[in-house]
Image (cartoon, rainbow, N blue to C red):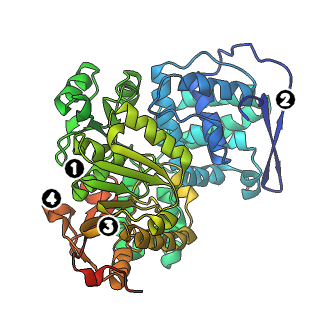
Amino acid sequence: MEGTLSQLSFISSNSSLFLRFHESGKKVSKVNLEVSPHRAVFVVIVLLFLIDLKGAFADLLNEKGKGSGSNEMGYVERTLGFRTRPLDDRDLRLVTDIVGGAIRWRRYLDHLIASLCHSQKMFEGMEPLLLQILRIGFYEIVKLDMPPYAVVDENVRLAKVALRPGAGNMVNGILRKVVLLKENNTLPLPAVEGDDRAKARALATIYSHPVWMVRRWIKQLGQEVAEKLMTWNNSDPHFSIRANIVKDFTRADLVEQLTMLKVPHKLSPHLDDFVRISTGMQIVIQAGLLKQGLCSVQDESAGLVVSILDPQPGETIIDCCAAPGGKTLFMASRLRGQGVISAIDINEGRLRILKESAMLHEVDGVINIIHADLREFAGNDPVKYDKVLLDAPCSGLGVLSKRADLRWNRKLEDIEVLKKLQDELLDAASMLVKPGGVLVYSTCSIDPEENEERVEAFLAKHLEFNIDPVDRYVTRDFVMKRGFYFSNPVVHSLDGSFAARLVRSSNDKFSLPNQ
């Protein structure tokens, strides 16, 4: 697709979106200096993202880092039909921030835009590219407090160049309206009143989340905590970086590098090899620290799951849903060259990434890559392992602050499908544990149905397993009543995650699961 797409035009008919790709045969060479490059890029990225062409553009926040800017400019050229000057480092950071914000706040932004259109029909019939330009402009004015009339001017110019003069006039009129409303503190918001459903709809608009999530969280957590959770999800994500001690690169070395790069940082209070940063990820990427395998981006909540498994030199371990391999690499570093980790996954492409990362981090000598479906593999593999990690596929409801798109790609029905899969994978993983061995079940979800309820259902039919409380491996504030691990975004300011440490009895009479 990337090699043949020279122009992208959009047709909107009866509120349905149709895409028409065609080759114009004319090479775009003129550089448009009127439109700022970051504005052109993030409008195109948001547009492509929201029409589900995720594979058609590069993620600016990737570990390879360099070169992504030129890729983005190529998409601008083919999509908008003109080129701008190249992106600099500041542009890259700005694009990353604004793209994430505009996607995250989509529902709220659409509410504001629709309220300033002449009619709902006008909003529903709006061209996709025009709508993205308005979303970006509204986000900058309402959420970023950028100079309003500069935002208006730049978006008007973009609309005129990318669409037509009339589109620029419409953007000008609508954006000027929202500027006045913002200045007068009269932005239209739905009232949180009425029955539970009406309140959930209003809160879903105010905090820009799907209604089903809001209703679920209010029921599980109460309205106050649900609002705090959504506020966290909408905040700028912060990141943790793990120093790769296998390469003799310690946390002190990482701190020295971050100080030299002038990237603000704090030491993790939970894990010895981790450092927190809230800004400067692009600087870290472009400095080559990730590319050299000296460190990796990994949330502390994921690192704590590895601490709960507690890998020790000489052990045999299997990571049951390993790719792309963040936990695998951390476990491998804990083995210090002694022992074996079998990394199994059903996705061959993601396993290739894991294999490349293992070589880069110099832990490939203890990692054995296996491409298979765990449910089939477990029944055919006679080998039993000291420790088994099942980091199960889940809804990802604990990582919405980092995954701006995920809230819009999840449906309520997904959880039922995932629960069935989680049960099947847990049953399979349990077959690989030695008598006396350890099974850790983990997710990056905050939903009880995917977490403690799955473990309780498993224990009810697998009497050979018992809960091993995690308080020996993490501090008490992460420990639930039943001895499970839970990182709460609202409480801990980390990604939401869950883990249960289970020990298999060494008694032979429990060698088979009770069905």
The x, y position of residue 384, in whole percent, is 33, 64
The answer to whether any part of residue 437 appears in the image is yes
Residue tagged 4: 475
Quadrant in which the C terminus appears = bottom left
The structure residue drawn at horizontal position 41% and vertical position 22%, both measured from the top left corner, is: 286
- Seen in the image, is 472 located left or right of residue 302? left
Q: Describe the element under mark 1 as helix, strand or loop.
A: loop
Mark with earlier residue (2, 3): 2
Question: Which one is earlier in the sequence, the residue at label 3 or at label 1?
Answer: 1
User: Disc 3 designates what residue?
Assistant: 433
Percent from the top left, x then y, of residue 7? Answer: 79, 30
Per the rendering, the mark at residue 23 is: 2
Decide which of tag 1 and tag 2 comes sooner along the chain: 2
Q: Nearer the viewer, residue 480 or 488?
A: 480
Tag nearer the camera, 1 or 2: 1
Q: Secondary structure at mark 2?
A: loop
Q: CA distance from mark 4 to mark 3?
A: 26 Å
Measure how far apart labels 2 and 3 are at the Cα level.
56 Å
Gap in Å between the C-alphas at discs 1 and 2?
58 Å
Is the C-beta separation of discs 1 and 4 under 8 Å? no
Sort mark 4 into few (<14), some (14-19) or many (20+) by Cα contacts within 10 Å: few
Q: Nearer the viewer, mark 1 or mark 4?
A: 1
Q: CA distance from mark 2 to mark 4?
A: 59 Å
Q: Is residue 246 left or right of residue 228?
A: left
Q: Is residue 413 left or right of residue 493?
A: right
Name the secondary structure under disc 4.
Answer: loop
- Residue 502, quarter of picture: bottom left
Looking at the image, can residue 222 be seen? no
Badge 3 density bin: few <14, some 14–19, many ≥20, Cα 10 Å = many
